[in-house]
Image (cartoon, rainbow, N blue to C red):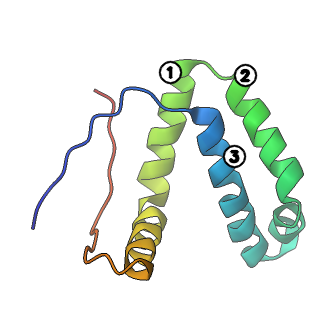
Amino acid sequence: MIEFRLLVDEIDYEALTRYLAPLLADKMGEKGGLGALLGGRKEPLTKMAVQMVKSMGQEEKDELLLRLISEKGDMLVQRVNKSAAKRAVGIHVDSITAQKV
């Protein structure tokens, strides 16, 4: 097994939010109830999420990303592995973690 360590210096949080918000909406839609109602409205949900991120300070953005990776790391691993398999890339990721340095 090989462990990679990537140091990330700059993140475009608005672009990341525009990418992740529709994925979150899909997950919410799968759960039914209020989640389904909100999940069916991807564009307004995305705009609201981008506005929220714009209003946050850098430390808050960093902490939010760390918390999301901590809580949703398994989902991220599944997406990476699915994407690699789809492209016939012979790699399997076991885990993804993040910490502030």
Q: Position of residue 43 (x, y in %)?
A: 86, 53
How far apart, in angstroms, are the residues tagged by discs 1 and 3? 20 Å
Count of numbered circles in the view: 3
User: Looking at the image, which residue is at 37% across and 26% down?
Assistant: 9
Position of 2 with respect to 76 (left or right) is: left
Q: Is residue 84 above or below residue 16?
A: below
The answer to which quarter of the image holds residue 88 is bottom left
Question: Residue beneath label 2, please?
Answer: 55
Give the alpha-carbon distance from disc 3 to disc 2, as whole Å. 15 Å
Residue at 35% in and 33% down: 8
Say what secondary structure mark 2 lies in. Answer: helix
Q: Earlier in the sequence, mark 3 or mark 2?
A: 3
Q: Dividing the image into 4 quarters, which one contains the C terminus?
A: top left
Where is residue 95? Give x, y as percent: 29, 63
User: Few, some or many C-alpha atoms within 10 Å of disc 3 (few <14, some 14-19, many ≥20)?
Assistant: some
Answer left or right for 58 relative to 43.
left
Label 2 crowd (10 A; few <14 / some 14-19 / many >=20): few
* Residue beneath the point at 50% across and 40% down: 65
Which residue is the site of mark 1?
Answer: 59
Label 2 close to label 1 by CB (< 8 Å):
no
Which label's residue is closer to the chain start, 1 or 3? 3
Give the residue type at disc 3: Arg
Could you tell me the amino acid type at mark 1? Answer: Glu
* Location of residue 38 (image quadrant): bottom right
Question: Given the image, on which type of amino acid does mark 2 rest?
Answer: Ser
Vertical placement of residue 12 versus 78, above or below: above
Residue under pointer 3 = 18
Q: Residue 35 location, x and y as percent? A: 80, 66
Mark 3 vs mark 2: in front: 3
